[in-house]
Image (cartoon, helix red, strand yellow):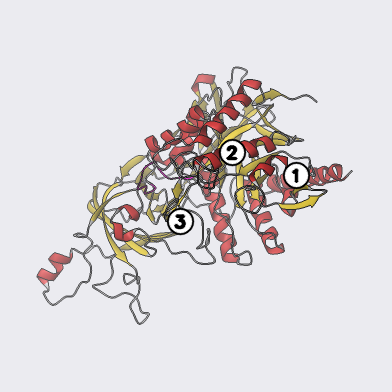
Amino acid sequence: MLPAIIRLISVVWATFALIQAAEAQTFRLDSSPDVVMTNASSRDGLNLSGGWTWSVDPYRDGLQGFHGTAAGKGHQRFDPVDVDEATRKNPGDLYEYDMRRADKATLPGSWVSHTPELRYYQGLMWYARDFHYSPKPGKRYFLRIEAANYTARVYLNGTFAGAHEGGFTPFTIDVTGLVLEGENSIIVGVDSVRTDQSVPPPVTDWETYGGITRDIQLIEVPGTFIDEAWVRLTRDGNIAASVRINGNACAGQAVEIAVPELELTMRGTSDERGQVELRTTAPHKLAKWSPENPKLYDVVVSTAVDRLHERIGFRTIEVKDEDILLNGKSIFLRGISMHEEELGTSPARAMSESSARALLSEIKYGLHGNFVRLAHYPHSESTLRLADEMGLLVWSEVPVYWLIDWDSGETLDTARSMIAENIHRDRNRASIILWSVANETPVSDARNRFLQTLISDVRALDDTRLITAALLTRQTEENGQTIAHIDDPLTDFLDVLAVNTYNGWYGDMPLDAVHDIKWPDDHGKPLIFSEFGAAALAGFHDPELIRKFSEEYQAEYYRQTLDMSSNITFLRGMSPWILKDFRSPRRQHPIYQRGWNRKGLLSETGRRKEAFNVLAAHYKMLEASGIAHRATTD
């Protein structure tokens, strides 16, 4: 009786949420970015990645004097003055910086790679470079930084252009009128310090990598341009498109969306806000995107003065009772979690396309996987596009992690902005099926209100995907049997339940008892094991016993947990922790860790551990048995 009541409540809530989404602005929330710039890398302009000078500023001297006043002349690192030239002209002038002659680094990439002394630096860093440009009359210009961790202040030719908070989502600043003919100077102050009101908070279990870690671009567009285009397959079999025009002449623009391979064209006219909504029946010959057939179509969005190109896959994702349905068929998510950190002994979060492909290939072809949890923050757009291309389903999340300040309106605003920036950037990615709003957050009334607000935002921004969060569980002992309970009140608001479980690694449970844990079905919803794992130092084998940090222990942990998972009737996927060993300042065992979290199935250099083969064999069995993809029955 209880599961039926819970299912009824869930249906009522889902209906209410859909009504809310329909009544909300179809396209934007207050927390949405002013400029989205869909497929920014395809735009004309100038890629500013490459060589930049850098200057460390631990006391923020470039912003503020030691008496609390604004930084004075000689300290303002954002001033593009040529210090050597200035002091030759006025020998009495004192400058305590020189951005033109400072040390150089290649961006994007964290400052941990600039010099060994910056390995654990947390603070303000200044970056500068000059570039030559010839702005054209009637064009608009934007500076776009794909990620700068954690806060950034941008100056163009000595003028403050804009700021941004959040280390993993892009920001785009209008610099029309600030770009000069000829030589230009751009200076960015990036501060990695986070407070209790930040997202994530100061304490995490991963390396946060301060600096500019993704591409920097100067973008040139027409005065009135296509800012955003979201094209998707709806669950009722239509191709829907939402387009937003940006500019003084945004209203009354004739908009055309074409998918040439499908001989499909949709046309409409933008309203007074520059928005247009289009919809048509999907062509019969449409090939739906899936891991087995990751078909992408060239899509062209055009107006009289602008044209935007995208590559989009069309698929549906939904939940029916305890099943996750991809294109109407039940699917089991054979996955793994992954941090945005390249292979190698000295990663700097400089994730090139080849770096991302190397990791995703281990999942797709090595593990026989079809799913990746991109933890614990939005990963780069290029990684998501690779997932589209390679056929990997994706869980995408924001770093609402551990001890967020649930009572802070400022923190909530930051989290809402991150959610909006993430969704607006990636709504065209067929690979993304799950938006996650949190990871391992302790239950409280304030936390519940906070996360319900995020869930409401997600539903308003994107009604085509599923919502989840990585939850904690509670265990009881009944007649000698361990029972795992998912009783987080957030379960009523999620489409897919997800839990992190580490029995056999954390806690007192013997490893050989893990397989016998029972998971009652109290909610009538699909479940994902979003994390489970054990650490092992690659190459460490103890011939006398199976002990923690040995490859044998990690492999046996996987066998036990996978045996347990096989008895959970409503389990529909898993993303164990984690693909590869990753940097974590928390982990300081002098033999096994030395600043690395060793729960990877690969070492930091890509060496496969025994547990890799255990999971790969399990996934190959699931794939071969048809559990991976089967038709549902009513």
Residue 346 is inside the magenta segment: yes
Task: Specify the segment rendered in magenta.
Answer: 339-349
Question: Among all residues in the image, which is located at the extreme right?
Answer: 1
Q: Please tell me which of labels 2 and 1 falls first in the chain.
A: 1
Q: Residue furthest bottom?
A: 67
- Left-right relation of 557 to 75: right
Q: The C terminus lies in which quarter of the figure?
A: top right
SS class of the residue under badge 1?
helix
Q: Position of residue 43 (x, y in %)?
A: 38, 39
Residue at 53 percent across and 62 percent down: it is: 201
Kindly report which numbered mark, 3 or 1, lies closer to the viewer in this rendering.
3
Nearer to the camera, 294 or 259: 294
- Magenta stretch secondary structure, dominant: loop
Quarter location, residue 514: top right
Q: Residue at x 80, y 44 (%)?
A: 522
Amino acid type at mark 3: His
Which amino acid lies under the numbered mark 1 shown in the image of this protein?
Ala
Label 2, secondary structure: give it.
helix
Find disc 1 in the rendering and name its residue: 14
Q: Is residue 192 magenta?
A: no
Q: Residue 36's spot in the image, x, y percent? A: 48, 46
| Badge nearest the viewer, 2 or 1 | 2
Res. 301 in view: no
Tell me which label, 3 or 2, sits earlier in the chain.
2
Side of 143 relative to 434 (left or right)? left
